[in-house]
Amino acid sequence: MGSENECDSPTTDDPPSAPPSGDAGGEEGKAIPFITLSFAADGKAQFAVTEEARAMLADISGPLSVISVVGMYRTGKSFLLNRILLGQTGGFPVGNTVNACTKGLWIWSKPLRAKAADGTPVNLLVIDTEGLGSLDASTQHDCSIFALALLVSSFFIYNSVGSISESAVENLSLVVNLTKFIRVSEADGGEEDGSQFASHFPKFLWVVRDFSLLLVDEKGRDISSKEYLDTALREIKGFSDKVVGKNRIRSMIRAFFQDRDCFPLVRPVEDESLLQDLCNQGEEVLRPEFAVQMKALRARVFSSANPKLIHGAQLSGPMLFSLAESYVGAVNDGQVPSIKDAWSSVCETECRKQVEARVKAFRAAADLLFETEFPMDGAALAEWQQAAEEAAHAALAAATASLGDAGAAGSKELGVALAGLRAWLVKENDRVASEKAAALLSELLLPLETRLDEA
């Protein structure tokens, strides 16, 4: 069915790939597991966010953009990722079998350099996903993969082949089940209608491979790719159950992905024999039109990679990891992942880290003061403490400004911790003062004691 056959399963011992070219940056990287899938003894699927991903995300600060590529298996997702997004032949491995072998989500180990629509530089993370619709996967499993990719992304590419036909739209029928697999509010309520999804879902780009149609309307007038997509998503006429079901898919795609567009790509080569090993072919074998479209698509992605936001707050690498952990935990527990619950968990975790950082900085400054200035006049020590505490609270407020109620709770937690350090400082200052006073008194009394002994 696809432009080329591929096995979407990277292995952890793949050698580092060649550096991406152009905007992708010059650092080496490789595909590493992000969210893996295993099966318990009872056959129950268990997702897990990997320690390798934790280590990779630990030092990445915001703004952070996350692009996921999703599509039916055997439709060339990895080729799109490697040649168009990474700008190289290697990367996410591509095979020549008919087996879908990726399980879960994989991430490129180095952030790429990109820009948001307003020109702001961002760190772009690239995610490959398990192909949907494989013979050994259930609809529930596909929905979990689709939902996890949606929830962690700010830019969502859906990859398909041919045209946006009726069957292509039906392949996205799993969007109908998203209300059963994602919640915006708390996880203990009933099923939501999905009306709030649009404000939380990523930008949606439908990439159509091997596209051979003319972009014209029914009157032969030129139309844009966005107009082509919107035309394909119009409701069809009829009242049968089948028509109602088809229209429900269309209405949900329109409602959930309000920032949507389409990007058609022509067939990459004329020679059918080259498709089996297309990923290893040089650009000279590609059709000129396809090569131009590849560059245009890449330029579009890298110039409109908006940051991942939740409730207006930008995510860092560690926050993305915490978010993924929260979603995965809910899925494994048989619950519906809640955006609000997951965000609250991320905020609490991030705020705890920031409080610990402020306490550590205060303690380091206090230790230096202890070593160089003690004992101090009580008023001078109180003045130093007040200034240091105010600075710690100001730094915490700046770091947690977008974390809502967690920031206020963190401020209280920091206040308690600093109160303890304040008492410790006063006690240590008094102890050092007493010890120095005793030493001074001993030094002053020594001559007197000497004369008394001589007498």
Image: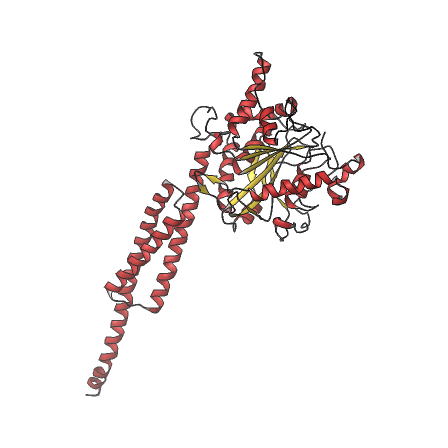
x%, y% of residue 331? Answer: 52, 32
> Which picture quadrant has residue 214?
top right
Identify whether 31 is placed above or below 376: above
x%, y% of residue 13? Answer: 67, 47
Q: Is residue 355 left or right of residue 272?
A: left
In the picture, which quadrant includes the N terminus? top right
In the picture, which quadrant includes the C terminus? bottom left
Q: Is residue 10 visible?
A: no
Say which residue appears at 71% left-offset and 38% top-offset. 289
Color encoding of the figure: secondary structure
> Which picture quadrant has residue 168?
top right
Q: Is residue 70 left or right of residue 182?
A: right
Identify whether 28 is placed above or below 404: below
Residue 400 or 169: which is nearer the viewer? 169
Identify whether 368 is placed above or below 158: below
Farthest top residue?
Answer: 240
> Which picture quadrant has residue 253?
top right
Say which residue appears at 69% left-offset and 39% top-offset. 79
Give the mark count.
0
Say which residue appears at 70% left-offset and 41% top-offset. 291
Residue 227 or 39: which is nearer the viewer? 227
x%, y% of residue 395? Answer: 37, 52
Say which residue appears at 20% left-offset and 83% top-offset. 448
Farthest bottom residue?
Answer: 455
x%, y% of residue 97? Answer: 74, 35
Q: Is residue 309 visible?
A: yes
Q: Is residue 192 left or right of residue 276?
A: left
